[in-house]
Amino acid sequence: MTAAHPVRRRGDLRVALLFLLPAGFGFVLFYAWPAVQTFYLSFTDYSLLAAPNWVGAQNYRDALGDARFGNALLVTVEYVVVNIGVQTVVALLIAVLMHRLTKSSFVRGLLLLPYLIANVVVALVWYNMLDAQLGIVNALLSWVGIDPVAFFGETSTAIPTIALVNVWRHMGYTALLIFAGLQAIPRSVYEAAAIDGASEWRVFRSVTLPLLRPVLAMVLVLTMIGSFQIFDTVAVTTRGGPVDATRVIYFYIYEKAFQQFDFGYAAALSVVLFAILAGLAVAQLRLLRAGSSDLD
């Protein structure tokens, strides 16, 4: 019996590897190999019309002195702050209300509907709704005596508008992630807080938030990475304008690669962005102590 146990384990391992093979092949083909190629091209001058020419770290030195790249990074950070801040607060509020008032599958399905719509469709719908001349939102504002607002056309409102459009699309999905975390909190903890006479706000601040920390850490990391990758909403609506006010880093990389055909420099910017995201993700997970819970 004991001799057959290692044999059975080896057989299970082979079956597991067989099932993992298609996913592993897809990962290597569509993620790992392109990443290796991108890293190599970041050290070259490559315009698609000739073979890559090795230039060493010149692309990275150029990035340090690229004012438009610095501006794109700042614009992206502005978007990330608005998007994550509003989305997390709204999603947390929705999740707590669902947890207290209803656990209906129908309500959860309604919350998820905007997330199921393609980003491009969402961007086009909101672009037309917020149009300064023909949009329904400005028509409603004019009825109450407010002048039309060029939501996508003003430097002060373009990025907040794009951020809020994406908040609308993603907040239901984020709320469901937080709601799942709330479901995992034992009711006995709330019962003990009620016996101690804790107020609703005190329970939320001292019980709910600390116990939600691992889930909130995951949500913040996912939304942060997704926010830095904003592209399609900008490409459909403002295309980087007005006056570079919405030229986020992904759109800038796209311009360098597919409009100016400077693939080597675009690859270097992609590597820089990957390093920034990896550093921020690790910092977030450590600061929020994502691997531990106050239930332990």
Image (cartoon, helix red, strand yellow):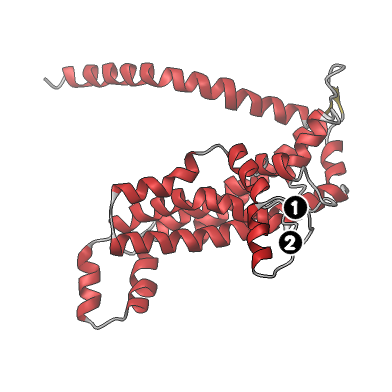
Q: Identify the element where label 2 is drawn.
A: loop
Q: Identify the element where label 1 is drawn.
A: loop
Q: Which residue is mark 2?
A: 148
In this rendered view, identify the residue nearer to me: 145 or 169.
145
Q: Earlier in the sequence, mark 2 or mark 1?
A: 1
* Residue plotted at (49% across, 53% down): 171
Can residue 154 be seen by looking at this rendering? yes
Q: Which residue is mark 1?
A: 133
Q: Residues within 10 Å of mark 2 (few under 14, many from 20)?
A: some
Q: Quadrant of residue 8?
A: top left
Can residue 295 be seen by looking at this rendering? no
Residue 281 in the image: x percent, y percent? 56, 50
* Residue plotted at (73% across, 52% down): 152
The mark tally for this picture is 2
* Residue plotted at (57% across, 20% down): 29
Q: Is residue 171 left or right of residue 5?
A: right
Residue 190 in the image: x percent, y percent? 25, 70
